[in-house]
Amino acid sequence: MKLWRRIFYKKRKFYDDDFDWSNYTADSYQRRLEGDVETSYRAVSRAGQLRFDAAKGTVLSDGVPIHPNQQLILEAVGRLGPASVHEVGCGGGDHISTVAGLFPEVRVSGGDRGKTQLALALRRHPGLKDRLGLQDITMPYSHRWPEAELVYSQAVIMHIHTAVSHFVALSNMVRQASKYVLLMENHECHNFVADLQMLADGGHLSWDSLHIHRFDGSTGARAVLLSREPLDLPVLTSDFDLREGRSPSFRRLKRADEDSARAITGFRRP
């Protein structure tokens, strides 16, 4: 991030989202793709360029590597074996399209709050026609949203900071998923483990049980994986466990604490 942007960012109010979504167009997103991803990684994979090694639970890429975050998402799908997958905040559609290509037996769908983002996704991936729709995950839950066994986000919830919107988003994702929720996010931007435990304790999650695990990709990325049933994966009991070995930003942790403190969960008697 350039110095002048960093200075401006520090002066922003903590209850603002990272982006003005009404002005975050497909052009904005495509510039970030080209500048942050496609300089080092292959964002769009064609038939035969990826394969899943079921014995090792890893995805193998021919030629240019794929981004570690995308690698983790694909490995999670391969190892968990869901019949259906939905991406919250699908943007240009690269991740969900790759899921569909690598696992053709899986029913996929994607939602994004930006019409221009969805138009970009269809230009990049015409095969996603009739699989995408407008979705604001911070709205009250809609029964018109497609349900899926696995619902995931990639660099979406980390940008939501207005009021208690990220709590609403997390609750909605759990309700939309029948088995798993995968959060491939920057884990400094929210106290994901503590916030999810708070939502569960307050009765805001639709599942009758919640198991919070850490899922590690084979190329270094890590994510929060929620499951209705216990899995043979590391259990997360705190955000410290999730951030282990990393050097978190004090500024981001301060903002995460302020976001968490705004929540009033459950029905507390005075």
Image (cartoon, rainbow, N blue to C red):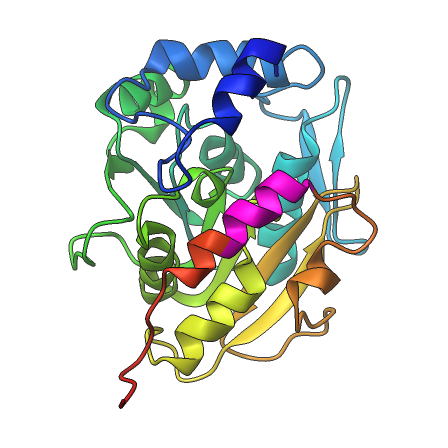
Residue drawn where x is 59% and y is 42% of the image: 252
Q: Is residue 146 above or below residue 208?
A: above
Front residue (pair 78, 160): 160
Q: Quadrant of residue 201?
A: bottom left
**Residues in magenta, as a range:** 249-257
Please provide percent x and percent y for residue 7: 55, 19
Q: Report whether residue 83 is seen.
A: no
Image position of 71 (left or right of 175):
right
Tally of numbered tags = 0
Residue 254: in magenta span: yes
Residue 125: in magenta span: no
Q: Is residue 269 above or below residue 192?
A: below
Q: What predominant SS class does the magenta segment belong to?
A: helix
Residue drawn where x is 28% and y is 28% of the image: 129
Image position of 141 (left or right of 3):
left
Front residue (pair 39, 129): 39
Front residue (pair 67, 243): 243
Residue drawn where x is 49% and y is 76% of the image: 228
On-image quarter of the C terminus: bottom left
Q: Is residue 182 above or below residue 117?
A: below
Please provide percent x and percent y for residue 111: 31, 39
Q: Quadrant of residue 40?
A: top right
Please provide percent x and percent y for residue 245: 83, 51
Front residue (pair 258, 128): 258
Q: Report whether residue 122 is seen.
A: yes
On-image quarter of the N terminus: top right
Image position of 102 (left or right of 128):
right
Q: Quadrant of residue 168?
A: bottom left
